[in-house]
Image (tube, coloured by chain):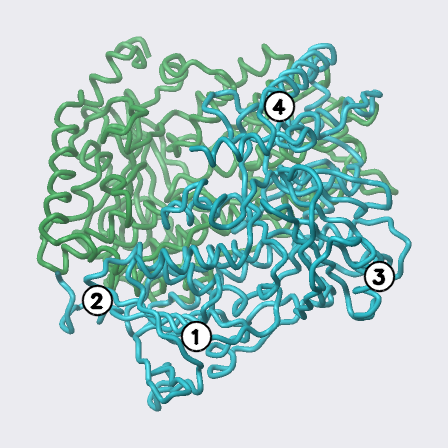
Amino acid sequence: MADKALKRILIVGGGTAGWMSAAALSKKLGKDNVSIRLVESSEIGIVGVGEATVPHIRFFNQTLGLDETDFMRKTQATIKLGIKFANWGRLGDAYIHPFGEFGRSTGDVDFHHYWLKTRQLGNPREIFDYSLPCVAAERGKFMLPRFDQSILATYGYAYHFDTNLYGPYLRGYAEARGVRRTEGKVVDVALNGETGFVESVTMESGEVIKADLFIDCSGFRGLIIEQKLHAGYHDWSNYLPANRAVACSTEWVGAPQPYTSATALEAGWQWRIPLQHRDGNGYVYSSEFLSDDEAADRFLKNLPGKPISTPIFLRFTGGIRKKTWIKNCVSVGLAGGFIEPLESSSIYLTQQAITALIENFPNKDFEAANIDEVNRVMDLEYERVRDFVTLHYHATERDDTPLWNYVRNMPIPETLAYKLRLWRERGHVVKYKDGMFLPPSWHAVFIGQRIVPKSYDPRADFRPVEEVHRMMEDIRLSVDRAADSMPTHQSFLNGSGSMIPAGAA
Amino acid sequence: MASNAQNPSGEPVRSILIVGGGTAGWMTAGVLARCLPAQLYRIGLVETAERRGGLAALDAGEATLPPITAVNQLFGLDDAALLRGADATYSLGSSVTGFARPGTSYFRTFGRFGANIQGVAFHNLLERMRRKGMTASLEDYSIAAVAARLGRFAPPAAGDDPLLTAYDHGWHWDAADYRALLRAAAQHAGVARVAGEVADVALRGADGFVEAVVLADGRRLEADLFIDCTPEARLIEGALGSGWEDWRHLLPCDRAVAARCDRAGDPPPYWQAEAQAAGWRWRIPLGESDGCGLVYASGFCSDDEAEAALRASLGSGAGTLQRARFASGRRRNMWIRNCVAIGDAACVLDPLEPTALQIVQDGIGTLLNLMPRKACDAGETDEFNRLMGETVERMRDFLILRYKANARAEPFWAERRAAAVPDLLEHKMRVFEASGRVLEWDEETFFEADWVAVYFGQEMRPRHYDAFADTIDAKLLRERMAEMRRSILAAAESLPTHRAFIEAQLRG
């Protein structure tokens, strides 16, 4: 079988997706077994205005064997405990979607059922008061979670980092493991006339690079997967109306918050991603409801600090390539699809595509079953992220602008409608094995956006009500004390050595 | 307690009536009585005397999967109680003979194979080495399979070496005895038993909810929630017309003939399944005797032929022959309004894997997680039907694989080989055949090791193995695998014999 093993892999495009692919494959395959090359053009920019991630990125970094402190220092990273959503359910509302649990395991019924029960009995506390990552985030606190039975084991974390730095960081890693980088633009892609497989790409320099497997990391345009192999695109604009963004960086205005901010505006929402010495900002909006000029105007007035870069404009269409993988070309990252950044899913979906490729790694036979499987899994991943992001728009009482009137009334995917119904009726979250968001994420957005279930699990009535009140209060107090005892996010960054000393950046 | 008509969440269920006095009924009633507080719920059971057909009526040994342990613990049935009270023995799984083709045999035990190296699944490492001429079998890397082969048994010892501890056990027991244990424990837990025959099921005019079960003697038993555990689906089908999805085109065996028979020698720690011309035979070792039977497809084998074949295989020590008819399939809706079907009323499967009690257990667990209020209008019926539907379909797919991947000559087996399989199974098989990868869907009962045992046992060789297996140094791999084999064999040989272990438990 070894003779059927792939000998040459070519990664086309060197943004985050390209270098993540290069790093993972070079680690996994070793340099003796295969030649991995990556072509990129420094003339083609990447979308880098600060990037927020989800906790899965830690597993990716750990698999590579990266040192966390070193990684954080070199990418200007800060800690992310969740996302703060403001003005989504109603103007004036705010909640945090945390990386972690609400309450803690009660040994029987899920915690939120107890919260729903006591709420019916007059408990005025928000469920977010019982979540350590929410409370710590609000107070600007952080320490590494523990792996024990305590309240300090009820959360995870991710990072905000500078994507302009993460790619190069991984580049160093990949090049040290034998990946060869070639600078330049691809001007042609050649297919085999008989099989339709990709044979080579031709560089502007005239060099022809052949490979057995091509990984298309060329971004939205899908240089091979779309332009040459015509994968087609499932356009999800009907569920995800935002299709533009304007973004820029701003000056440091104070200690970084340990969370991403996502503030709903008239025709979309604005992000704020705190890095160590500056903030990344952007306004994601729908061109149906707002012109670029109006958006830029609104955005610039809304910035938390002084701009230190020229605003850039991005256009995109929410959706997924009809096939992630065709013949000997796999698309990874934006080339494979895009869901707007509301839930920081972009790097996660890139990571999942790489994982799916590795789990179904081909040989020269390019078995159809494995290709089908990768396409199936990626469809599922994207659809599940789509549903979750769609929920944020749809679950609103806002009626102040045409965008909110549209999303409040738009038809939603059946899979989401089913989930909504089970939640609305009895506080039940429909679970699945594969996919990004665990039940607490759904609890956060449902409750944070005012979809409070009509009833709760009847088993929450099994304990005497006084005992339930006491248990709830114990949890709330332990959350409160634990958050208090944590260092501030800033002092965590300083103390752990993750911080570049001011002025050295 | 906050439980009254003003409850803004809706009126809670306060009374549950289980109909049917078989294992499904008593298990359901007992678990509910243990898990729902007695001051809030009244649990009753109508024990019907008649037992119509079906595999559950046979007295020829019953095997289980490992998760039954949770039920036994809930009922306070420890090992000694089962060994003494239900003529039980331990089960590491089954031996599967002749299914791939005549002359083949493998163990389908409840345990993992080998240890993964650098993230590559063990069976892919083995596949690589087999192509390099290594002759070891997959089973040499499973402590459960090696112990089964040696007739040895003990539950996994405490320890952190998964190679030696990643296995589990189920049981073989006398079905009627086990039912009696559950029945006594359930009544002890507060289940109110009513003996009688169901004459009628009264539906509420306004919304078609079940209002009461009317017994032959005129008694009328009302409840908020009804659980249909009757083999003939008296409520869910008889009264509510759920509909039945017939799976005989996928699993055509529809008859069984069975008997108790004497056993010479010690009970093996596994049960046996052996392929026959138009079906297969079982032998389940109990404490005092064996339960034996033949499962066959009536389209390929007459009842007389089946009886003759079973008699011939059992020899002189066999008891009276018992006959059963069944059909694999599922109820279209397992929960309708305020009526939930659990057990045979919900789904019947070919007994090639001991799924019957598992289906009961899954039904109860799913119901508890979706415990409704009186109106049953909060989506729980759809969610129960979705979850249980997927659960039994994934079980079905695992059974189909053993019929599909065969190289036997008889017409029954040739037809199975040619028959189409459900889409999800087909995709799963294609991916394994291409690359040795085992997919798991949501709501699986059988996981990677279970599938690997059957894929390998049925002689389905993947065309390729995990490409990353080739990145591991061959010498290192050879050494690690030899070491695994040695330590598994040594550990298995150090276990007591199955009989010795049983005797030690009985001595307490």
Chain that bears disc 1: B
Q: Is label 1 in a helix, a strand or a loop?
A: strand
Which chain contains the residue that carries disc 4? B
Numbered tag placed on residue B135 in the rendering: none
Q: Nearer the viewer, mark 2 or mark 3?
A: 3
Secondary structure state at the residue bearing disc 4: helix
The residue at which mark 4 appears reads as B492
Which chain is home to disc 3?
A: B
Can you identify the residue that label 2 sits on?
B9
Viewer-nearest of discs 4 and 2? 4
Q: Earlier in the sequence, mark 1 or mark 2?
A: 2
Q: Which residue is mark 3?
A: B412
Look at discs 1 and 4 and give the one toward the viewer: 4
Q: Secondary structure at mark 2?
A: loop
Q: Could you tell me the amino acid type at mark 2?
A: Ser
Q: Could you say where residue B96 lies in the image, as x and y percent from the top left? A: 73, 44
Distance in Å between CA atoms under marks 2 and 3: 55 Å
The CA distance from mark 4 to mark 2 is 55 Å
Determine the CA span between mark 3 and mark 1. Answer: 37 Å
